[in-house]
Structures are given as C-alpha cells and as structure tokens.
Image (spheres, rainbow, N blue to C red):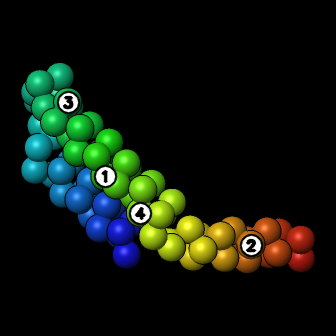
C-alpha cells in the first residue's frame, strides 16, 4: 500500500518538479519529496504491519535461492 503510493509520489515529483534544464534549482524540491516519502514508508513498515509482508517476500526469495 504505502510503498506503491510513495513510489507513485516520487515518480510524479520527478515529472512535475524536476526540470532537466534547471537541474540545480529543482533538484532540492524533488529530493525533499523523495526523502519525505522514504521516511513515511520506513515508519509505516516499522510500526504498521507491512514489515510482515516484506519479511514474507524476503523469506520466499531466500527459499527460491536455495532451490536454484
């Protein structure tokens, strides 16, 4: 949930705020939005249950590596 929203927000920020012609002026805005999304995602993972979802993905990937 929150990881998809965070990724979409960062992609939206890149398209809307990041200007390649004025890169140095627009990069701080894009970076601030990206850092806020990262912090929000980390807090959500840590405190609201998506940690279990990510751990199940990691366990399945580790099990997949053992079989190859």
Between the C-alphas of marks 1 and 3, the distance is: 14 Å
Label 3: few (<14), some or many (≥20) within 10 Å? few
Of labels 4 and 3, the one closer to you: 4
Between the C-alphas of marks 4 and 3, the distance is: 24 Å
Q: Mark 3 vs mark 2: which is more N-terminal?
A: 3
Q: Is residue 45 above or below residue 67?
A: above
Of labels 4 and 2, the one closer to you: 4
Instruction: Identify the residue at horizontal 34%, vertical 55% (top origin).
Output: 40
- State the SS at label 3: helix
> Do the numbered discs 4 and 1 sit on residues whose CB atoms are within 8 Å?
no
- State the SS at label 2: helix
Q: How far across and down, in percent of the image, does residue 39 sit? A: 37, 48
Q: Mark 4 vs mark 1: which is more N-terminal?
A: 1
Residue topped by disc 3: 28
- Image quarter (top left, top right, bottom left or bottom right) of the C terminus: bottom right
Is residue 57 visible in the rendered image? The answer is: no
Residue topped by disc 2: 59
Labelled disc at residue 37: 1
Q: Mark 1 vs mark 3: which is more N-terminal?
A: 3
Instruction: Identify the residue at horizontal 51%, vertical 60% (top origin).
Output: 46
Between the C-alphas of marks 3 and 2, the distance is: 37 Å
Between the C-alphas of marks 4 and 2, the distance is: 20 Å
Instruction: Identify the residue at horizontal 80%, vertical 75% (top origin).
Output: 64
């Amino acid at each position: 949930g929150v990881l998809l929203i965070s990724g979409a927000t960062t992609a939206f920020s890149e398209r809307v705020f990041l200007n390649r012609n004025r890169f140095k002026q627009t990069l701080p805005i894009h970076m601030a939005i990206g850092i806020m999304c990262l912090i929000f995602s980390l807090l959500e993972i840590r405190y609201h249950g998506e940690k279990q979802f990510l751990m199940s993905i990691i366990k399945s990937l580790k099990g997949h590596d053992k079989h190859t």
